[in-house]
Image (cartoon, rainbow, N blue to C red):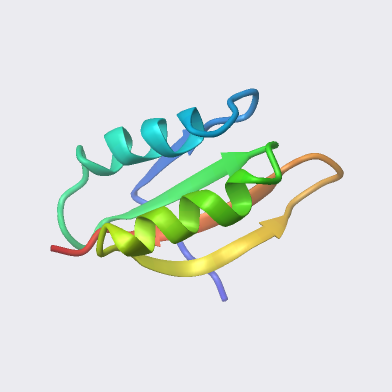
Amino acid sequence: MSIVPDHEIDIRGEHCPYTFVKSKLKMETLAPGEVLRIVTDHEPATKNVPRSMESEGHEILLHPHKVNDTDWEFFVKKNG
């Protein structure tokens, strides 16, 4: 599955709850239907951020997966 994001946020080095706060603030700048790629190196964020995004009404297009030894990525589509 190849997803081309409209925007990207790198939250490596951040920890919860800042991982969600920064992701949420970035989502607020997107238009409905746009896709955000999120990159993190904080494993708890791979569960907390997608869950929070879904509770905000957004769609997880690609769930968190490892891209290297330390980082994960996932893609969120803004709904609304």
Q: Is residue 49 left or right of residue 31?
A: right
Which residue is pictured at 86% across the width and 44% down the height? 69
Q: Position of residue 27 (x, y in %)?
A: 28, 44
Total of numbered circles in the picture? 0
Which residue is pictured at 28% across the width and 33% down the height? 25
For residue 14, above or below residue 36: above
Toward the viewer: 68 or 53?
Answer: 53
For residue 54, above or below residue 5: below
Which quarter of the image is occupied by the N terminus? bottom right
Q: Residue furthest right?
A: 69
Q: Position of residue 29 (x, y in %)?
A: 20, 37
Which residue is pictured at 48% across the width and 33% down the height? 17
Q: Position of residue 57 (x, y in %)?
A: 25, 64
Toward the viewer: 25 or 6?
Answer: 25
Which residue is pictured at 21% across the width and 45% down the height? 30
Q: Is residue 74 left or right of residue 33?
A: right
Q: Quadrant of residue 80?
A: bottom left
Q: Position of residue 24 (x, y in %)?
A: 32, 40
Q: Quadrant of residue 33?
A: bottom left
Q: Residue furthest top?
A: 13
